[in-house]
Image (spheres, rainbow, N blue to C red):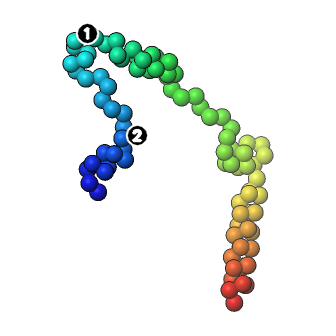
């Protein structure tokens, strides 16, 4: 790939250089006010923990622990494989 093609594809992901050294040292930081307002509204600190989600937490952990999803998955795969083998003969 050419460098210009990669640069064009990543242009939407990588933000442009907004704060140049000349802009910051000259004292005219008025154009950075929207950027500063955006970053000041972002949440600070660690991300909140996700509680209770997922298949493992629902079926394999806690008081309702069961191997039923694993058994049904194995039986489903066996049935699917048997059906394909039966149809191909």
The quadrant holding residue 22 is: top left
Identified at 37% across, 47% down, the residue is 9
- Mark 1 surroundings within 10 Å by alpha-carbon count, few (fewer than 14), some (14 through 19), many (20 or more): few
**Labels 2 & 1 near each other (Cβ < 8 A):** no
Residue linked to disc 1: 27
Q: Which residue is labeled 2 in the image? A: 12
Q: Name the residue nearer the viewer: 45 or 89.
A: 89
Q: Residue furthest bottom?
A: 89
| Residue located at (72% from left, 45% from top) | 58
From the image, which quarter does the C terminus lie in?
Answer: bottom right
Q: Nearer the viewer, residue 2 or 71?
A: 2
Q: Is residue 63 above or below residue 31?
A: below
Q: Position of residue 71 (x, y in %)?
A: 74, 63
Q: Which element carries disc 2, helix, strand or loop?
A: helix
As rendered, which of 75 and 39 lies closer to the eye? 39
Of callouts 2 and 1, which one flags the residue occurring earlier in the amino acid sequence? Answer: 2
Going 32% across and 49% down the picture, which residue do you hit?
6
Residue located at (58% from left, 28% from top): 48
* Mark 2: few/some/many CA within 10 Å (<14, 14-19, 20+): few
* Left or right: 82 as drawn, with respect to 29: right
Q: Secondary structure at mark 1?
A: loop
Give coordinates of residue 1: x percent, y percent: 29, 57
Left or right of residue 21: residue 37: right
**In x, y percent, where is residue 44?**
49, 21
* In the displayed structure image, the side of residue 74 where residue 24 appears, left or right: left
Point out the residue furthest to the top here.
27
- Residue 44: tell me if it is visible: no
Instruction: Give above or below for 74 relative to 25.
Output: below
What is the count of numbered marks?
2
């Amino acid at each position: 790939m050419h460098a210009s093609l990669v640069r064009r594809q990543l242009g939407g992901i990588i933000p442009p250089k907004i704060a140049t050294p000349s802009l910051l040292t000259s004292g005219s930081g008025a154009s950075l006010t929207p950027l500063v307002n955006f970053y000041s509204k972002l949440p600070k600190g660690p991300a909140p923990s996700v509680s209770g989600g997922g298949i493992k937490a629902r079926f394999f952990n806690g008081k309702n622990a069961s191997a039923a999803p694993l058994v049904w998955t194995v039986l489903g795969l066996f049935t699917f494989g048997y059906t394909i083998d039966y149809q191909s003969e």
